[in-house]
Image (spheres, rainbow, N blue to C red):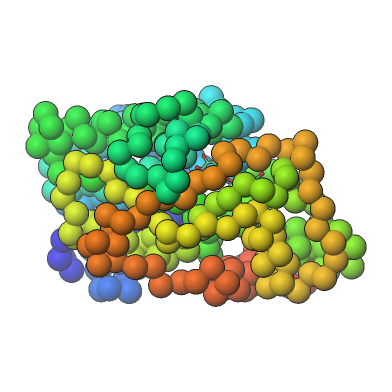
């Protein structure tokens, strides 16, 4: 991939695609192909084939997907499996048919078994039952991994799959019903502080452990692996450390400046008890994340105040 290569970032308005786009632009890649959802519906196979036939991109970052937090996944499993299967099948197949040189597919750490040994190595894929709250999403992502591997084996198509851990950062979804835990807690603590509320409710028991990667670090790893990784085996992308939801809540409360009480609602699902990736294969290639969790949370809170609060009329930041 060189500076003049024609690169399609699918999903460039999302958290991940947006970060990959920023990263590519910062490095001087200028021949970028982009389409909004209104311009190109990736679930529409004919439209996707037409687009690839006309544009003929050389490299594809497949960051378009239907994503959401634990409650959205548990409530809308049909939407998650359908949209993800359609998007990835259309894009991977069209990329192969229209001569793309290399494609990067993004999976998720939820593809591993619910009770996999920790930290989770790439080889644990399909060794046990999945976490029920996100099974539909995980099955779609596993299908994407297997499709990419099958196209490589049968057609020699150069495609790779990255498994990122839980992501966060600027451009995230802050809707309280459908978001992931970090944006949800940033918003809850911010609004409680503004309104002078004494307590904030956090879902579940607070005991689950999660690993969090700043999306700019993921984008850095994605560009790095697009350049240097050529294997069929999936590769984990994370920081190699996790924290409990309870610890995370205290940290976000401190970053936001909320001084009230944090209470837990055990009627909401905890999800998988622990989800820590083994990142030794990636680290052995010399890659390391750069953004610490506290720094990333401060920066994401600043983004929320500057971009989200004003835009949605949620009161002064
Ligand atoms: O971020 P989250 O929705 O993702 O939830 P998962 C992580 C943990 O935070 C769970 C707790 O134990 C939640 O119960 N939590 C506490 C909250 N308060 C909140 C809150 O206000 N909102 C949310 N969302 N969580 C998703 C999968 O699972 O992870 C997806 O459903 C995807 O498939 C994504 O893989 C990375 O890690 O539980």
Q: Position of residue 98 (x, y in %)?
A: 15, 39
In percent of the image, x 19 and y 60: which residue is there? 227
**276 lies left or right of 121:** right
Q: Quadrant of ligand 1?
A: top right
**124 lies left or right of 299:** left
Residue 218: quarter of image: bottom left
Residue 156 higher or lower than 310, as above or below: above
Residue 201 higher or lower than 232, as above or below: below
Q: Position of residue 307 (x, y in %)?
A: 62, 67
Does the rendering let one see residue 313? no
The N terminus - image quarter = bottom left
The C terminus - image quarter = bottom right
Does the rendering let one see residue 70? yes
User: Viewer-proximal residue, 189 or 247?
Assistant: 247
In percent of the image, x 42 and y 48: which residue is there? 119
Residue 260: quarter of image: bottom right
């Amino acid at each position: 991939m060189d500076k003049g290569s024609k690169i399609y970032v699918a999903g460039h308005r999302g958290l991940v695609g947006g970060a990959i786009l920023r990263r590519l632009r910062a490095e001087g890649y200028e021949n970028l192909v982009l389409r909004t959802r209104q311009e190109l519906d990736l679930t529409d196979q004919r439209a996707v084939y037409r687009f690839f036939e006309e544009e003929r991109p050389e490299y594809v970052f497949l960051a378009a997907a239907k994503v959401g937090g634990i409650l959205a996944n548990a409530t809308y499993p049909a939407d998650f499996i359908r949209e993800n299967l359609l998007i990835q099948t259309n894009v991977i197949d069209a990329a192969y048919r229209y001569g793309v040189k290399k494609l990067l597919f993004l999976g998720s750490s939820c593809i591993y078994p619910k009770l996999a040994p920790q930290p989770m190595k790439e080889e644990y894929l399909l060794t046990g039952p999945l976490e029920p709250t996100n099974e539909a999403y995980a099955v779609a992502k596993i299908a994407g991994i297997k499709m990419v591997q099958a196209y490589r084996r049968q057609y020699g198509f150069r495609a790779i799959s990255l498994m990122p851990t839980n992501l966060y950062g600027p451009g995230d979804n802050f809707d309280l019903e459908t978001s992931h835990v970090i944006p949800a807690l940033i918003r809850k603590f911010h609004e409680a502080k503004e309104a002078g509320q004494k307590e904030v409710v956090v879902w579940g028991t607070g005991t689950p452990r999660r690993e969090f990667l700043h999306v700019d670090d993921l984008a850095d790893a994605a560009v790095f692996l697009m350049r240097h990784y050529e294997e069929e085996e999936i590769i984990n992308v994370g920081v190699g450390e996790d924290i409990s939801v309870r610890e995370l809540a205290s940290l976000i409360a401190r970053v936001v400046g909320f001084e009230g009480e944090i209470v837990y609602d055990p009627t909401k699902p905890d999800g998988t008890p622990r989800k820590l990736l083994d990142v030794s294969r990636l680290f052995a290639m010399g890659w390391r994340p750069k953004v610490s969790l506290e720094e990333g949370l401060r920066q994401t809170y600043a983004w929320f105040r500057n971009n989200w609060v004003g835009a949605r009329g949620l009161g002064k930041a």
